[in-house]
Amino acid sequence: RVELRNLAGDVLRLDFAADATLNQVKAEVAKVWRVPVLCQKYLMGPSAADVLEDDVLLAELRAEGVDQIAAISLTLVVVMSEVTSHLSHWSRGSRQEGLQALAQLESVDEESLQTVCCLAK
């Protein structure tokens, strides 16, 4: 079980197999919260200072001696840096992926739109 919180304080609880990766969590969050995988970063720890890698196994996140039934608690941060990187990439496929991620976002702030406009020039 994984318990996800976003910075607005919303909570999402999902069940995954122990051998699931963070990428699988991202795919499910993209469906439920409509946050593109490209825009998702996850933090873990008491100070939420540890940014997790996409290929980390959920089983690796469970501290030794912690009850296997207890949820793994993660904080979702929506970032635009990967979208910006994809939009400015030389590869057409990467640029399309960046645009698709931007289109999936429920709301896009002014700064993000300005970034896209600058990259389009």
Image (spheres, rainbow, N blue to C red):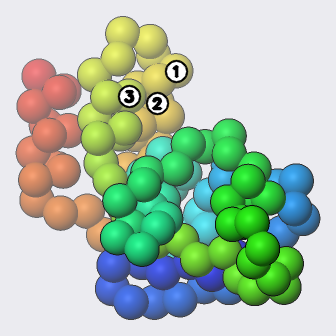
In the rendered image, is residue 21 in sight?
no
Up/down of 81 relative to 43, above or below: above
Q: Residue furthest top?
A: 90
- Residue that mark 3 sits on: 86
Observer-nearest of 22 and 80: 22
The answer to the question of whether label 2 and label 3 lie on touching residues, with beta carbons closer than 8 A, is no
Amino acid found under the numbered disc labelled 2: Gln
Up/down of 116 relative to 121, above or below: below
Question: In percent of the image, x 39 and y 67: which residue is there?
Answer: 48
The answer to the question of whether label 2 and label 1 lie on touching residues, with beta carbons closer than 8 A, is yes
Which comes before the other along the chain, label 3 or label 1? 3
Figure quadrant of residue 121: top left
Question: In percent of the image, x 33 and y 78: which residue is there?
Answer: 7
Rendered image: mark on residue 93: 1
Q: Residues within 10 Å of mark 1 (few under 14, many from 20)?
A: few
> Considering the numbered disc 2 on the image, is that residue within a helix, a strand or a loop?
helix
Amino acid found under the numbered disc labelled 1: Gly
Observer-nearest of 81 and 109: 81
Question: In percent of the image, x 87 and y 62: which residue is there?
Answer: 18
Q: Nearer the viewer, mark 3 or mark 1?
A: 3
